[in-house]
Image (cartoon, helix red, strand yellow):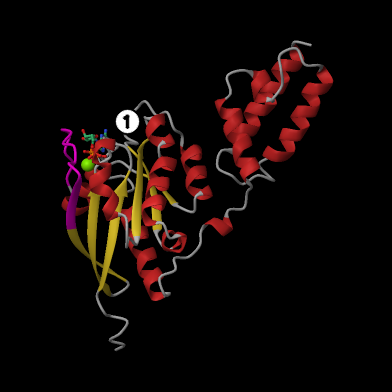
Amino acid sequence: MDSKAKRPLRVKVISMGNSEVGKSCIIKRYCEKRFVHKYLATIGIDYGVTKVKIKDRDVKVNIFDMAGHPIFYEVRNEFYKDTQGALLVYDCASKESFEALDTWLNEMKREIGNPAEIENVVFCVCANKTDRQKRTVDEAEGRIWADTHGCYYFETSAQTGEGINEMFQTLFSTIVEACENGGKPPSISTSLGYTKEQAEAIQRLKNSKSDWERLGLYPGSSKDEINKAYRRLAVLLHPDKNVAPGSEEAFKILVSARTALLRGK
Ligand code: GTP
Ligand code: MG
């Protein structure tokens, strides 16, 4: 037996995201297999340890569960360093918490300082509370953010348990893989298969309020202008050419926006 390969590993994982998005509940669901309805804000930081076995290897995971509230910045900022894995959590019924992911990532980058250290962190985005009815951030939007920031993406519910084990399993096995590979996790951003422009076109079509806006035109544009804008976007969005999440839906929106605008001509 190769004793070196079986050496127990110690890894550090942190949780990030706005307050009340469910960071502590996700960790509790995984470690204690239970869910707490009542909101108990984390004060500064919570620390816990869990042991897992990944590919025949004992792994001791130190989990630092951060408080999301801005008043705890001074307390949590010293815990970013020497991290192998990070959960970036948002509530899929809160656009604000989704938009805050950039701020969280930037806070971590600022505190760590060294870009090479950030590159070695395995990030898992958790679109949490999928059990809730009123969803305001759809799956495609979340996936695109994760893809374009080199993160894994999971739909989770700490309440029902959806996605939690899969998420931690991916996180831990990627960390172990990275440790066996000199600390470097496998790159997921190079296999994207779509451009930023394609991803942005999808979001614009889905989030625009009027058909004019969907085609990037001003009200009253001519038939020629409508067709020209349509053709440009159709090339960007056609599902045969665009493999980004949500391209099919965006293409359908584009076709009906053009039809509606031409009908008025
Ligand atoms: P801070 O510690 O303040 O940063 O918040 P947190 O992100 O740790 O949130 P916490 O895990 O304490 O959960 C906040 C509230 O959301 C609690 O009332 C939980 O019961 C609820 N909650 C967490 N996860 C879920 C979920 O998946 N579904 C639903 N419906 N509620 C959830
Ligand atoms: Mg908490």
Residue 175 coordinates in the image, percent (x, y):
36, 65
Inspect this view and state whether residue 131 appears: yes
Q: With respect to residue 159, does 83 lie above or below?
A: below
Q: With respect to residue 52, does 231 lie above or below?
A: above
Residue 132 or residue 72, whichever sits in front = 72
Residue 40 coordinates in the image, percent (x, y):
16, 36
Q: With respect to residue 64, does 234 lie above or below?
A: above
Residue 65 or residue 160, whichever sits in front = 65
State the extent of the magenta-drawn residues as a range.
Answer: 34-48
Left or right: residue 246 versus residue 99 is right
Question: Label 1 is placed on what type of residue?
Answer: Arg
Q: Residue furthest right?
A: 224
- Which quadrant would the N terminus be assigned to in this image? bottom left
Residue occupying image coordinates x 29% and y 75%:
56
Residue 74 or residue 7, whichever sits in front = 74
- Which quadrant would the C terminus be assigned to in this image? top right
Residue occupying image coordinates x 53% and y 48%:
148
Residue occupying image coordinates x 64% and y 30%:
252
Dividing the image into four quarters, tell me where ligand 1 lies: top left
Report how many numbered discs are placed on residues in the image: 1
Q: Which residue is mark 1?
A: 132
Residue 98 coordinates in the image, percent (x, y):
41, 36
Mark 1 residue CB less than 8 A from any atom of ligand 1? yes
Within 10 Å of disc 1 (Cα), the crowding (few <14, some 14-19, many 20+) is few
Q: Main secondary structure of the magenta part?
A: loop
